[in-house]
Amino acid sequence: GYDPVAIHVSAMLAAMGSQKGRVDVLSFYAVIRNAYSRYTPEKAHTILEQHVMRFGGKSNLILYVDGGPAQEKQETTKHRMESRNKAAVKCSESQDILETIINNNIKPRKRHFTDVRTSLAATFYWSSRDRQAFVTYMEQAGWS
C-alpha cells in the first residue's frame, strides 16, 4: 500500500557528515489514529515510538510534531471540525441502527459494523494536549 512517510536527509547535512533523517510524525496518521483510538495514551505512545523506530533510531532521526494550526488555516480547521462533528452524528446513528438490529434478534451484517467503525474513525482528532504528551514521552525516552 501507499506509505506517505516523509524521511529526508538534506544535502547540507549529508555533506557535513551528519546522516540524520527528518520525520514528520503526523505522516503516520493511520498509526496514530489506530493507536490512540484503541489503547491508553501510554500504550499508544509506545506503539507510535516503535513505528518511528522502524525508520531509524534516536541518533539518526529528527522528529517533527506540528503544534497548533496556523492562523491562515483557520478555515480548513473549521471545515475539518465540522466534518468530525458530522461523522460523530453518523456514528451515533449507525450505533443506534446496530443496537436496534441486535435487540430485535436480527442478524447484523458486516456493513452495520463497518458503518460504525468508519464513522468512528472519522471523528478522531490528535489534540495538541495529546501531541505534547507524546513529545514529553519521547523526550523522556531520549529522543530529540
Image (spheres, rainbow, N blue to C red):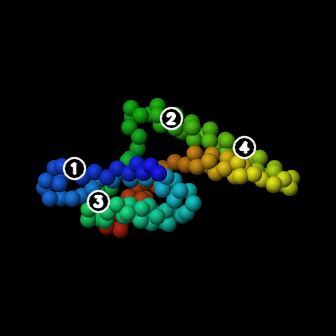
Q: Secondary structure at mark 2?
A: helix
Mark 2 or 3, closer to the camera: 3
Residue 87 pos. (x, y %): 62, 42
Q: Residue at x 38, y 47 (%)?
A: 67
Instruction: Say which label, 4 or 3, has the lower sequence index.
Output: 3
* Residue 136, quarter of the rendered image: bottom left
Kindly identify the residue that appears in the image at 17 percent across and 54 percent down: 14
**Residue 55, percent across and down?**
34, 60
Mark 4 residue crowding within 10 angstroms, few (<14) / some (14–19) / many (20+): some
Secondary structure beneath dot 1 equals loop
User: What amino acid type is highlighted by mark number 3?
Assistant: Leu
Q: Secondary structure beneath disc 3? A: strand
Q: Which residue is mark 4?
A: 93
Which residue lies under the disc numbered 1?
Answer: 10
Instruction: Identify the mark at residue 61; answer none if there is no mark.
Output: 3
Q: Nearer the viewer, mark 2 or mark 4?
A: 4
How much space separates mark 2 and mark 4, taking CA atoms? Answer: 23 Å
Asked if marks 2 and 4 touch (Cβ < 8 Å), the reply is: no
